[in-house]
Image (spheres, rainbow, N blue to C red):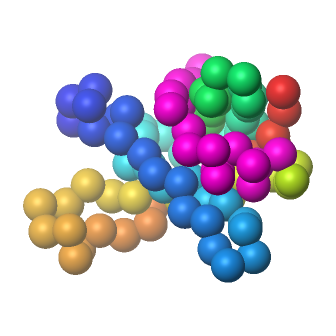
Amino acid sequence: MNNEEFSSYDFLINDEEEVMLLLYERENEPKDSSIELNEEHKTAILHRRPDDTITLNDIPNEAIDSLKETDKLLICELSIEENEEDTQIVYAYEAEITD
């Protein structure tokens, strides 16, 4: 897997303005996850595990607004498949939001 696939992610916001982060699976299961939100720069650092962090850039304003209203973020890590229809959720977990 190349770095571009690791840096690809998306935020989904439902009708209740709850936000979820979708990204491709990483090696090893998430543990003690948290996310540091930097509202001013529209960035965040996901601490997936103590030894694994992911920088998220250019977070949409709608996602920032929803993240400010909650203390946890639902994260789903997806498998990478040749056929997009075969994609599955590998890990689903919550990360505590900090700033």
Horizontal side of residue 35 vs 70, given as left or right: left
Q: Residue at x 72, y 66 (%)?
A: 18
Q: Residue at x 33, y 58 (%)?
A: 79
Q: Residue at x 67, y 78 (%)?
A: 15
Quadrant assignment for the C terminus = top right
Q: Decide whether residue 55 is among the magenta residues.
A: yes
Residue 59 visible here: yes
Position of residue 69 relative to residue 42, above or below, is below
* x, y percent for residue 93: 66, 57
Which span is picked out in magenta? 50-68
Quadrant assignment for the N terminus = top left
Residue 32 visible here: no
Position of residue 26 relative to residue 42, above or below, is below
* x, y percent for residue 34: 75, 36
The image quadrant that residue 6 belongs to is: top left
Q: Residue at x 67, y 60 (%)?
A: 19
Horizontal side of residue 9 vs 87, given as left or right: right
